[in-house]
Image: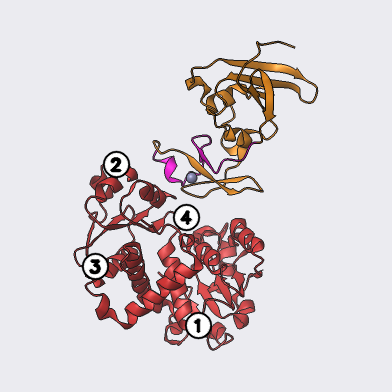
């Protein structure tokens, strides 16, 4: 397998569905951080066929990864400290998603006021249902066209 | 600072406090006639709804306060394309409380997010119209003496009727409530409402004829069935009489089955029903003002 230099402190995000690495890169705000990031695309995986991996060298307390729980449950978060895997972090669904997904209800105030942040709240944790903070319409993965 | 965006913004206990306050206002109006002296209500109506606007304005005037607002029918020149967020930040400097009506869903929530004064949602598209729900509840509470243990029939266009969705959700928080939904197949109660009833373990049945439901009801909430909602003319002609309440149908109802309607009525309640002591739809208008007075006092923390 392709090898990228070991990191001393940071995260290795493994088992990312192939093609989603850049999406995650943007949603974690990694483009705005001044830290080394390795993006490995289409790595071979026994379980998944192909997968993406992200390696981020940063202070492990500086990054909120909860949005990953929303994007994909199966992503593995390895926390690296002193060059070793210290823990596999369990992710919790965020209470609120700000500008991660868009409300597509044509009757929603966000459809005419474009500068408003798109805010969704976790309405049902068990069923993983998010609703628009303004119109309460449920988010359906296939109606946003956000996965790119 | 509190807002009223949906009926769920108040717990069952807080709603009871609000209804008790409305009772006290009704019985001791003099005590409240100057309680809001010097206070201003802004009515921001982005779409016309004269009845709702006048009810809010009357409520504030009855409390001794005064009212400011957009010139009616001229919203675009009043706001000049300004966002709701900016408008409410400006209005917050003029008024002490605002009632907003807007054709888009969630507009009142946007106003609340940027406001430094309490916001009353006076209708945001097909989403919420909480003061209508509260006045419906106060009417039921005053006439029946309770909000629990009853069978509520809701008749007409249940698919697009925002007021009935909100009423069902609000009443399903009380003990011993069951519902009978009376509508044509095409205009049935949507899943998101019946899902709430399933989750809360509340009984409901769905029927297509008013006659079949009327004997078991403690309250009958009528709404309009609009011709445009039907797929074809034949269905409309075949079905429309099922949803018109007249004396003949009302004869099968319980002697204390009160009839509510959000108004305006078109032809779904025959005028002959108006004189029946069970007709409560004009009483709702009266409770509307009293409930809005109680809402204003509660949000201004003057109760
Ligand atoms: Zn929305």
Q: Nearer the viewer, mark 3 or mark 1?
A: 3
Residue A94 in the magenta stretch? The answer is yes
Q: Chain of mark 2?
A: B
Q: Nearer the viewer, residue B99 or A62?
A: A62
Label 1: how many Cα within 10 Å (few below 14, some 14–19, many 20+): some
Q: Which mark is residue B36?
A: 3
Q: Nearer the viewer, mark 3 or mark 2?
A: 3
The residue identified by callout 1 is: B144
Horizontal arrangement in the rendering, residue A101 relative to residue B41 (left or right): right
Q: Which quarter shows the C terminus of chain B?
A: bottom left
Tell me which residue sits at (53%, 36%) in the image.
Answer: A101
> Which color has been applied to chain B in this rendered view?
red
Q: Residue A34 placed where, x, y %? A: 49, 17
Closer to the chain start, of discs 3 and 2, is 3
Q: Which mark is residue B82?
A: 2
Q: Nearer the viewer, residue B182 or B196?
A: B196
Please identify the dominant SS of the magenta region. Answer: loop
Marks 2 and 4: same chain? yes
Q: CA distance from mark 3 to mark 1?
A: 31 Å
Q: Residue A32 placed where, x, y %? A: 47, 21
> Which color has been applied to chain A in this rendered view?
orange
Q: Which quarter shows the N terminus of chain B?
A: bottom left
The residue identified by callout 4 is: B127
């Amino acid at each position: 397998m392709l090898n990228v230099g070991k990191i001393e402190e940071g995260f290795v995000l493994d088992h990312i569905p192939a093609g989603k690495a850049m999406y995650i890169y943007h949603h974690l705000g990694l483009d705005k951080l001044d830290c080394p990031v390795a993006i490995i695309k289409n790595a071979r995986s026994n379980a998944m066929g192909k997968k993406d991996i992200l390696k981020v060298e940063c202070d492990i307390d500086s990054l909120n990864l909860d949005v990953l729980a929303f994007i994909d449950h199966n992503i593995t978060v390895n926390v690296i400290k002193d060059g070793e895997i210290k823990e596999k972090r369990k992710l919790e669904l965020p209470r609120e998603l700000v500008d991660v997904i868009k409300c597509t209800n044509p009757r929603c105030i966000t459809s005419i006021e474009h500068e408003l942040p798109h805010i969704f709240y976790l309405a049902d944790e068990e069923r993983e249902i998010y609703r628009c903070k303004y119109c309460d319409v449920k988010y359906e993965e296939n109606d946003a066209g956000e996965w790119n | 600072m509190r807002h009223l965006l949906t009926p769920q913004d108040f717990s069952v206990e807080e709603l009871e406090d609000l209804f008790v306050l409305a009772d006290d206002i009704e019985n001791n109006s003099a005590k409240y006639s100057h309680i809001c002296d010097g206070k201003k209500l802004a009515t921001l109506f982005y779409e016309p709804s004269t009845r709702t606007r006048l009810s809010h304005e009357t409520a504030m005037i009855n409390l001794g306060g005064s009212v400011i607002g957009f010139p009616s029918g001229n919203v675009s020149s009043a706001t000049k394309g300004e966002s709701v967020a900016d408008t409410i930040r400006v209005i917050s400097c003029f008024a002490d409380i605002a009632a907003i009506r807007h054709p888009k869903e969630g507009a009142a929530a946007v106003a609340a997010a940027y406001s430094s004064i309490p916001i009353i949602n006076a209708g945001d598209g097909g989403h919420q119209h909480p003061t209508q729900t509260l006045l419906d509840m106060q009417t039921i509470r005053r006439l029946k003496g309770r909000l629990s243990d009853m069978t509520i029939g809701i008749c007409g266009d249940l698919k697009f009727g925002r007021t009935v969705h909100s009423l069902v959700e609000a009443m399903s928080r009380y003990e011993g409530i069951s519902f009978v939904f009376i509508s044509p197949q095409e205009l049935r109660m949507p899943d998101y409402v019946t899902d709430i009833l399933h989750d809360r373990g509340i009984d409901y049945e769905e029927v297509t004829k008013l006659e079949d439901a009327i004997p078991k009801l403690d309250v009958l909430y009528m709404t309009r069935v609009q011709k445009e909602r039907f797929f074809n003319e034949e269905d409309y002609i075949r079905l429309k009489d099922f949803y018109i309440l007249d004396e003949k149908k009302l004869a099968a109802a319980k002697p204390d089955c009160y009839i509510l309607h959000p108004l305006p009525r078109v032809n779904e309640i025959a005028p002959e029903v108006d004189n029946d002591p069970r007709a409560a739809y004009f009483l709702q208008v009266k409770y509307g003002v009293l409930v809005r007075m109680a809402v204003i006092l509660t949000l201004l923390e003057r109760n």
